[in-house]
Image: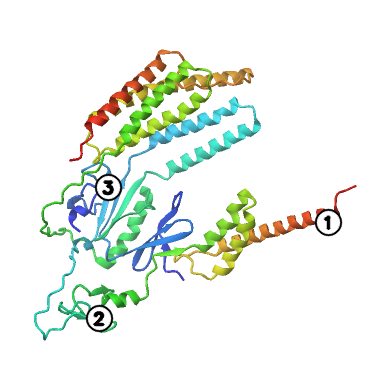
Amino acid sequence: MAANAIACAACSTPVPQEFWNREEGVRCPGCGRNLRAAVFPAISNHALGASPAALQGETEASCFYHPQSRATVPCQQCGRFLCALCDLEVDGRHICPRCFESAEKVEPRRVMYDSMALALSTFPMLLFWPALVGAPWALFIVLRRWNAPSSIVPRTKIRFVLAALFALAEIGFAIFVVHMITQVALKGPRR
Amino acid sequence: MSPYTKLTPRHRTFGGYTQLWLAPDHLLLLCNTRFSEEYKRFSFSDIQAIVVTRLPSQLVLQIVMILAALAWMCLWFAVDSRFAKWAIEISGALALLFLIVDMARGPRCRCFLRTRVSGELLAPVSRIKTADNFVALLRPVIESVQGALPAEGVTFETPDSGPPPPDIVSSPGYLPEFLFATFLVNALLLWSTARFPKVPELPAILLNTLFAEFVLIVVALLRRKGRDARVVVYVILGLSIVGIGFDIVTFGGELVRWYMTVLDKAKNGEKTITPLTFLPKNGMRLTIAYAWRAVAGVVGLAAAFFERPRQT
C-alpha cells in the first residue's frame, strides 16, 4: 500500500508523512479536523503478487500444481514442490494450498445458541400464546447445545441458565393453567 | 482459558454490537449480530497504521435536545391524567439522562485500521478518550513486533501503472422527479385544507407527506454527488429549501401558539381540546405554501425531463 493509503478517517484526504506519529495531533489538510496517525514499519511492505517463473529445461524441478512453472521451495507439510504462486508463507513456514485448507482453521464465525435460547424463552411471552412453542424450544436448545462452543472471548453460561429457568417457569405455568381448567371442567357448573 | 483481554467497551447498535479484544499476537474485532458472532483478526505484523480523526462537536445539538427534553417534562402541567404525567416525566428524565451521559463521554471520533490489503473502520473506538487509551495500549505491542518507524521516514516505489480506467457514469435515478411529484401532491393537499376545512383526515395525511417531502429533499441533495450532472433541477431543490424553511418558521409559530394556549387552558382548568394546525387557515401563508409547491413541482418535472442525459 502506498503512502496515500494513510488517509483522514473523516474525509479520506491523504495524510502527508510529516504528520505521522505526532502525539499532539495535527489538522487534516482536507477537512481541518484534528487527527492522529500512528504509523508502523509495515507501511513499507509493498510486496506485489508473485508470478511463477517458467520451466527452462527438463532438468529443472516443476511445481506439483503448475507443471509449466519452476519449483522454488518444497512444502514443509507434505513435501510437494511449489512455485512462487503456490508458496504460502504462514508463521514462517512454507506450505501448499492443499495443506493450508486441511490445517486447523481459524473460525471466522460462531453461532450464539445461548442468546438464541434466551430470546426464545423471553420474547414469545410478550404475546403470551407463542410461549407455548418458544419455551419447549428454548429448553431443547439449552439441553442440546449446552456443550457447544460458545464465543472465543470469555463468556459465561448465564444466558443458558436464565433461558432454562424462564422456560421451565413458563412450562410450569402452562401446566398449572391446564390443571385448573381441567379441575373446573370436571367439577361441572355450579347449581 | 481464553487468550483474549478486553480492549474497548461494546459499541452497541440496533442489530448487535462490536468490540475489540487483544490477543498475544493479534487484534480481534468482534461483531455480534444478536445470535452469531463474526471475528476479524489483525496480526500485529500486518498493521500499517491506525488513524483517529476527531468529529465535529455536537454541543449545540445536545443543548437543544436538553431544552427539548425539559420542555417535554413541562407538559406535566398541561395534562390531567396521573398516568400521563408520570409517563411524560419518566420519558423526559430518561432522555435527559441519556443526553447527560452522552455529553460526559466526551467528543466523538472515527478510527480506521490500515493493513496492506484492507482499511477497517473500528466502530468501538468512537470517543476520543477510548481512542487515546486504545492507541496507547496497542502501539507498544505493535512496535514490539515491527519495531518503530524510522525517524527519517520511508520511501515508496511508485509501481508503473497504465492509463486510469474510464469513469463509470451512474444513472441519475428518479428521486428528483419523485420529489417534484410530492410537491404537487402537497400543493393539492394544502389547497384542499383551505377548500374543505371540515375534513379531519387531510391534516393527518399532510403531516406524513410534508415529512416525506423534507426527507426526500435531504436525501436527494446528499445523493447528488457523483451521480447526477443536472443543474437546474438542483437549483430548484435548493430554492425549495427556502420555501420549506418559510413553512417551518410558520409551523414553529403555530406550535408555540398552541403550546401557550394549552398551558393557559391548563392554568384556568379548561379541559377543551386545542387542535394543532400546520398553517393558519385562509391566510396568505397557506396560499404561498401551496403556490410555490405547485410552481416548483411543474418547473422541476419539466427541467428533470429536459436535462436528463439521453442514452446514445
At x 28% / y 83%, what residue is drawn? A78
Q: Chain of mark 2?
A: A
Residue B72: horizontal and vertical position, in percent? 52, 30
**Residue A186: assigned label:** 1
Q: Are marks 3 and 2 in contact (CB under 8 Å)?
A: no
Asked if badge 1 and badge 3 are on a common chain, one would say yes
Amino acid on which the number 3 mark rests in the picture: Leu
The residue pinned by badge 3 equals: A35
Front tag of 3 and 2: 2
The residue pinned by badge 2 equals: A75
Q: Secondary structure at mark 2?
A: loop
Amino acid on which the number 2 mark rests in the picture: Cys
Q: Residue furthest top?
A: B283
Q: Earlier in the sequence, mark 2 or mark 1?
A: 2
Q: Is residue B64 above or below residue B260?
A: below
Q: Are marks 2 and 1 in contact (CB under 8 Å)?
A: no
Residue B155: horizontal and vertical position, in percent? 13, 59
Can residue A24 be spotted in the picture?
no
Q: Residue furthest front?
A: B312
Q: Secondary structure at mark 3?
A: strand
Q: Secondary structure at mark 1?
A: helix
Q: Are marks 1 and 3 in contact (CB under 8 Å)?
A: no
At x 13% / y 51%, what residue is drawn? B164
Q: Chain of mark 1?
A: A
Q: Earlier in the sequence, mark 1 or mark 3?
A: 3
Q: Is residue B309 above or below residue A148?
A: above
At x 55% / y 56%, what residue is drawn? A119
Q: Earlier in the sequence, mark 3 or mark 2?
A: 3
Between the C-alphas of marks 2 and 1, the distance is 79 Å
